[in-house]
Amino acid sequence: MRDVPTATYDEVDALDTIELPPPGTIRRGMLRFSHPTLVEWSWPYTAIRGTADGPHLALTSGVHPAEYPAMEANIRFMRSLDPAALRGSIVSLPLIDVPAFLPRTPFVCPIDGKNPNRCFPGDLNGTFSDVMVDAIFRSVIQPADALVDLHGGDMVEALAPFSIYSVTGNDEIDNRSAAIGRAFGLPYLIANRPQPGGLGGTSVQAAAAAGVPGIITEAGSSGLLTEPETRMLVEGVENVLRHLGMLDGEPRQASSIVEIDRFTWMNSPAEGMWYPSVAVGDTVTEGQTIGRIGDLFGETLAEITAPHAGDILFITSSPAMRRDGLILAIGAR
Ligand SMILES: [Zn+2]
């Protein structure tokens, strides 16, 4: 994985929409929006158009601002991609939650305290995060034939690498999203079905509802820029391009992918210190003790047990725990 030595960059800032460059060229610059809520901000973008026609991919990251392997994989992949080898086009935004990047606020945008990945497809009349994701959804995601939204563990989160797609009930879109997830090749693939209190407002959910198949991919943990996870994500993006016919060759087959149908997020019954007794990737049985919450005298406030058998897919890696705070997630086949 190295930069294309002959790459030249046509530097063009964009307003509200990103125009693709001429065939066989790369354009990059800052994306700005005319909406009054967003006028002081700008988003770096790169658009690459292949010499031949083909699908159009949206490649995003930095919806959560300390998921650095995801952002680095996006940056590195785009610099390594030779337009002469590409069929179709890609628009990349390496950092969506721009206001959160320098303050390092995990998960949320510091302007309104909202998690942008619960705000898709956005709202023109909402607060900053709603308006931001609305603008990005219209300009980058909706025009695409497929979406790959790169994530990982934010500042206080450890995880086993997985991809997740949104089940809409439209079999054609759902099957295409699942196939993109299998091609990406991370060890777990989660089918996220709508359920009361379930995960909503995500980039892939809004995309799939608008007819754009896609996946969220997760690799990397705890706000660290780690090389194996960065490479895993770069390789996954390459695999998806091969799967979509945008690059020559077949996707490199993952050795095995565990497909998850039941994804249970667990919340803390008490406020205090969180002591997990399992690690990400561990397999647990129903009723198994998986950790405890203690108070600041060291007394145990609650034992946490697994509600069903499965694999531990993520764990909040910070011990500081609110009542109802997210402690971990279990996935089952
Ligand atoms: Zn994330």
Image (cartoon, helix red, strand yellow):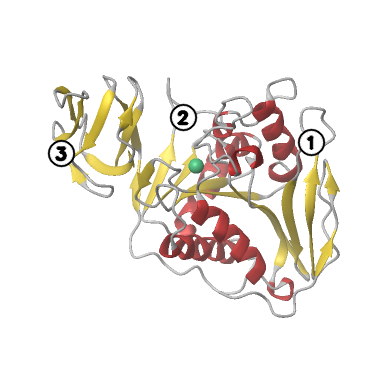
Identity, as a three-letter code, of the amino acid under mark 1? Glu
What residue would you read off at disc 1?
A: 40
Q: CA distance from mark 1 to mark 2?
A: 31 Å
Residue at image position (45%, 56%) is 182
The image's mark for residue 199 is 2
Q: Residue furthest front?
A: 297
Which residue is at the front of the view, 107 or 167?
107
> Is 264 left or right of 48, judged from the image as shown?
left
Residue at image position (22%, 25%) is 296
Quarter of the image with the C terminus is top left
Q: Looking at the image, tell me whether mark 1 or mark 2 is earlier in sequence order.
A: 1
Residue 203 found in image quarter: top right
* Vertical arrangement, residue 127 with respect to residue 163, above or below: above
Which residue is at the front of the view, 268 or 179?
268
Other residues around mark 3 within 10 Å, as few (<14) / some (14–19) / many (≥20): some
> Is 89 left or right of 217, judged from the image as shown?
right
